[in-house]
Amino acid sequence: MIRKFLPYFLYKKLFGDRRKYYYNFDKDDQDWLSWINNITKTYEHRDKSLIDKLIKLNAYKVIQNSLINFHNKNIIEIGPGFLDHEKFWKSKTPKSFDLIDTNLDFLKISEKKLNKRKIKVKKFIINKVKDMSQISSRSYDYVLSFFSLEHIMNLEEFVVQINRILKKDGYLIFVIPNEGHLAWGLGRFFFTRRHVYKKLGLDYDKIICWEHPNFSDKILKCLDNSLEKIKVIKVPNLFFLDFSISIKGIYRKNH
């Protein structure tokens, strides 16, 4: 991992000033509150970029794996955003599709799309891991998480909860940015970072520490500890992890 060898003045521009801010999360910080209040517009702007569209187009193809069949299944998604992967379902209609997020606006957007398909949906506002207790154990055939696991504080505990709510032989289908590695850090430096400074004037070296607390290698380690790995793919699938933009995969609950 190249980040381990970078001088810190470069490290913090690519991955945030984690020495200063990572362990000092303040939910009442003015920069953080401004970020949260504008997050829907910020992500909407990012999602319009050609690079982001290409990344997501490739990422959502994980749904087309032969193991995956949403028809008449119970599904829950962590951080559904704008439910952009809906187009990849084709004619396969889930029995139910529940939603987890910290942001009510995103939940409403996704709920509206599901209502058009006449799919049963429940919304869960989850701000802390303990809030997962409102979701019944062994309830879902699939847990989906597209570009969400990197955002979750106390990730180890949260992955245990994912394991709990999955049915036996149920699947976690996920995509994560290759956070903490060179290609993703450079991409953010040249694109998202500029937009955040220009439009919001925030201290992005601070915000990204709290917005993306988990590097991709940490996420994969947490998943390995709780679930059975079926398939993990780097995108692009190059020899050096630092040159990959995202990681997608499938894990299974086997007990």
Image (cartoon, rainbow, N blue to C red):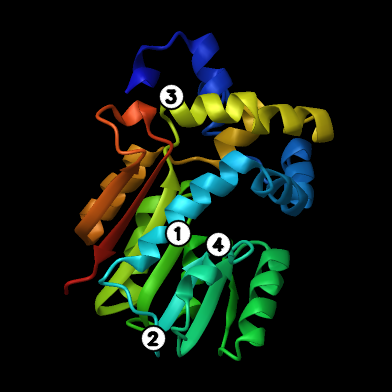
Q: Secondary structure at mark 4?
A: loop
The one of 209 and 250 positioned closer to us in this rendering:
250
Q: Which residue is mark 4?
A: 79
Relative side of 251 to 194, left or right: left
Residue 170, position in %: x, y? 28, 76
Q: Disc 1, disc 2: CB below 8 Å? A: no
Relative side of 84 to 170, left or right: right
User: Label 4: how many residues lie within 10 Å, few (<14), some (14-19) or many (20+)?
Assistant: many
Q: Earlier in the sequence, mark 1 or mark 2?
A: 1
Q: Earlier in the sequence, mark 2 or mark 3?
A: 2
If the image is split into quadrants, where does the C terminus sit? bottom left
Q: Which residue is mark 3?
A: 182
Q: Secondary structure at mark 2?
A: loop
Separation of residues labelled 3 and 4 (CA atoms): 25 Å
Q: Which residue is mark 2?
A: 73
Q: Which mark is residue 60?
A: 1
Separation of residues labelled 4 and 2 (CA atoms): 19 Å
User: Label 3: how many residues lie within 10 Å, few (<14), some (14-19) or many (20+)?
Assistant: many
Amino acid on which disc 2 is placed: Lys
Separation of residues labelled 1 and 4 (CA atoms): 14 Å
Separation of residues labelled 1 and 3 (CA atoms): 22 Å
User: Label 1: how many residues lie within 10 Å, few (<14), some (14-19) or many (20+)?
Assistant: many
Residue 75, position in %: x, y? 43, 79
Q: Residue at x 67, y 62 (%)?
A: 103
Q: Residue at x 69, y 47 (%)?
A: 48
Amino acid on which disc 1 is placed: Tyr
Amino acid on which disc 4 is placed: Gly
